[in-house]
Image (tube, helix red, strand yellow):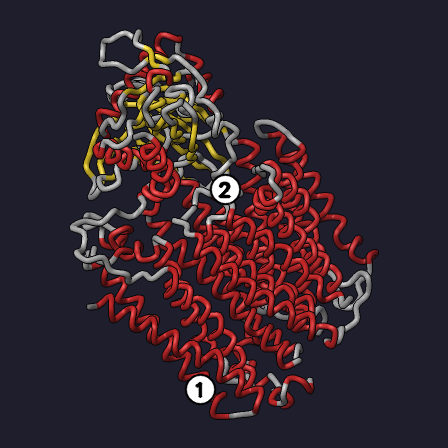
Amino acid sequence: MNKFLWPLAGFIILAVFLRIGLDLNPHEVPSPFIGKPAPEFSLPVLGTPGEALDKHFSPRDMRGKVWLLNVWSSWCVSCRAEHPFLVRLAKEGKLPIVGFNYKEVRGDTEIDASKLGAEAERELVQKRARAWLAQRGDPYQLTVLDIDGRVAIDYGVYGVPETYLIDREGIIRVKHIGPLTEDALREKIMPLLEQETRGKP
Amino acid sequence: MIPELGQFALILALAVALVQGALPLAGVQRGNAAWIALAWPAVRAQAFLLTFSFCCLTWAFIDNDFSVVYTASHSNSQLPLPYRIAAVWGGHEGSLLLWALLLSWWSFAVSLFSRQLPETMTARVLGILGLVSVGFLVFILMTSNPFERQLPGLPEGNDLNPLLQDPGLVIHPPLLYMGYVGFSIAYAFAIAALLSGQLDAAWARWSRPWTMVAWIFLTLGIAMGSWWAYYELGWGGWWFWDPVENASFMPWLIGTALIHSLAVTEKRGSFKNWTVMLAIGAFSLSLLGTFLVRSGVLTSVHAFATDPKRGVYILAFLVAVIGSSLLLFAWRAPKVGLGGRFALLSRESLLLTNNVMLAVVCATVLIGTLSPLIASALGKKLSVGAPYFNTVFGALMVPVVFLIGVGPFARWKEASLAGLARLLRWPFFVAVLAAILLPLSLDHWSPLIALGLALAFWIALTATLNFIARVRATRAGRPFLSTLFKQPGAFWGMHLAHLGIAVFIVGVTMVKGYETEKDVKMGPGDTVEVGGYQFGFLGVRETNGPNYLALIGDVEVTKNGKPYRRMTPEKRIYNASGMPMTETAIDSGFLRDLYISLGEPIDRENLNGEWAVRVYHKPFVGWIWIGCLLMALGGLVSICDRRYRVRANAVVITPSATQPAQSA
């Protein structure tokens, strides 16, 4: 073979990979949780200032409803971008959204959480989460606090924000990684939602 | 109305580009002089139309015309005027238009300054540039029209990404694009030469200054981007091996190899195929960079809004441009002669080694950048981070940098190993010894610090020695200094650029080896000591900027109890987007930077309480960018060399260029 063909051959291989790469969304990791029941948990619900964290929420409480579980943190930049859309979505009132506050203090690289006591961390988590919602609007029916991120492991959360669509039987139908957008809602979530509502008389 | 005029001009520009891309090339092939002659007016018309179109888009930004979708999503009436203008290239559509505009200006410059070239050669070059322009204009018009309207218009725009609201980012993209687009000239010259079959010294001489100018812009563009990342992102780093940074760095590496290779081809007629390959490679990598940034196949902090249609188009364009060039190369290259012979040890062989090494370095960067993509195409997940790049890049660059010291002493054709060793053993020992001893007098000693310093001293010493030897040889009784300044620009340029690398290495080595960083919680009255300076935190106050709210931290810096200065890191919240931004406070010095970045308040409701603050002492960090400036300056000095200015009467124009390509 003409040795001057090698660069061309190399480039063709590269182009094939680039073509395959175009169809892959780098954000998308096939989640083994899709089609499986949403892992059970019981986490404290964010309340008004002064209120103790004694109310708990569990996905079981949402049985019979199609709902979104939205993972967020105030330190997450993409969550800021996503938030106005969630607020609008909540105003439409089609889909209840439950906020899942993920490692509010521990995940923030600008704070050394190891120096805080457990109690101080709980306090700070609530303060920061409340301040965020007060400032930007609260699209959530309620917000649960996963202070140490243990429940998030069960859900396979690896980046914030992430959003899960959970159906009436408590099955995870969609996992969306990255900020939720108009397009993602229309293409991934609405079809399933319509299917669900049609399914029920 | 004005946006419609802009769009109309864009469509006309496409029509003109089609003419420019088709007729002159066909004319050369068929010997039709009228078609050939069309290249010049077509280039002028295209440059005019695209300039007009770009001005129309700029006007939409100045005028806050939010009925234009692109303006509405990248600007805001509160945005200060200079940033409104910079916002023109703050998004995908506008930056593509800038690409096309710069390409038309480069083409125009080629048509102006190539009078002494054979007409057919210039016509081919301009024709190829016209084809590249067609590709970009079709892309803009089909997938990324910046003039698209939405009626009724919005009352207010979305604002420019606050990260981009910064003087550094105003000039970073144009500089970078000047570099990318500039390589299209080297590429067009190479393809034209392949078409004509005339890969000779004259071809190398013509494309050398153009390539050098592109390389200078790219160097400055990358340095500017790195400097921006350093002061704006607030992480204290200056290079992150992010896919988009790599996308600009790969053409730079190949471009660096290309300017060296062109020198050999011009002087000795060797490496012709290799030089052509590098010219194709530098431009291909510029296009690949565009693909990686625009298509969203790789995730990156730079990610622009992505659209699968765009990705498919750019890939098709990439395949058409690179594929056809490589095919032409495979067809033509076997017929190209080898040129001047050279011995195993000669300046040619050293330059070739350096070239191959740079290409290998570029390949490792390419593999590192694309491997996550390739892995996911094969159904796996993989991420390649800075440790891979730092290790592989560092290890491969050591021999390259070592050769910088040897190359200028080696003779063309054949050099003597014993002679080189005799000349260079003293600078070698002095560099190594100084590099081992110097860090002992500093904070601590490590082998990497010694290695970095040894390489830097090595370059500096050999360059000095080379200057002395050169002046002695050419002095002929004249005073030393005047002979020194009479050395040709190419000689000065080479050593300035090489010294730039030495300065750069000192910066990287010192900041890696000796930087200190403290991440602390500070309330008013707290003090922290970093690098011999005491930083006293006074508290945070609020002020309003033109389009943001700022929280300004006051930090009083003292050294040994004596007041030094006050530094004011900021946290800004932009009104339109609500995005918070960190504005670092930097005290830049020749030998060190002090760098403060204000984090978050520990308690969001009490802004007068404690804040997370990051304080760095970064020795010699400024040398990183001074080094890059020196490299660019070296390039500039070398193209001011006399022989490029007097070439009009020096170059013998080869007559056979007008013959059809098949006969060559």
Q: Position of residue B501 (x, y in %)?
A: 58, 50
Q: Position of residue B63 (x, y in %)?
A: 19, 59
Q: Please tell me whether mark 1 or mark 2 is closer to you in this view.
A: 2
Q: Quadrant of the C terminus of chain B?
A: bottom right
The chain holding disc 1 is: B
Occupied quadrant, residue B378: top right
Instruction: Report if residue A53 is visible in the image.
Output: yes
Numbered disc total: 2
- Check disc 1: other Cα within 10 Å, few if <14, some if 14-19, many if 20+: some
Q: Where B182 falls versus B13 (above or below)? A: above
The amino acid at mark 2 is: Pro
| B502 relative position to B626: left or right | right
Instruction: Report if residue B557 is visible in the image.
Output: no
Disc 1 on helix, strand or loop? loop
Label 1 vs label 2: CA separation?
46 Å
Q: Where A185 falls versus A100 (above or below)? A: below
Q: State the residue at coordinates (51%, 43%).
A: B242
Q: State the residue at coordinates (45%, 35%).
A: B236
- Check disc 2: other Cα within 10 Å, few if <14, some if 14-19, many if 20+: some
| B176 relative position to B483: left or right | left
The amino acid at mark 1 is: Leu
Mark 2, residue position: A26
Q: Position of residue B51 (x, y in %)?
A: 33, 70
Q: State the residue at coordinates (25%, 71%).
A: B5
Disc 2 on helix, strand or loop? loop
Occupied quadrant, residue B343: bottom right
Mark 1, residue position: B38
Q: Position of residue B580 (x, y in %)?
A: 30, 35
Q: Where B279 falls versus B309 (above or below)? A: below
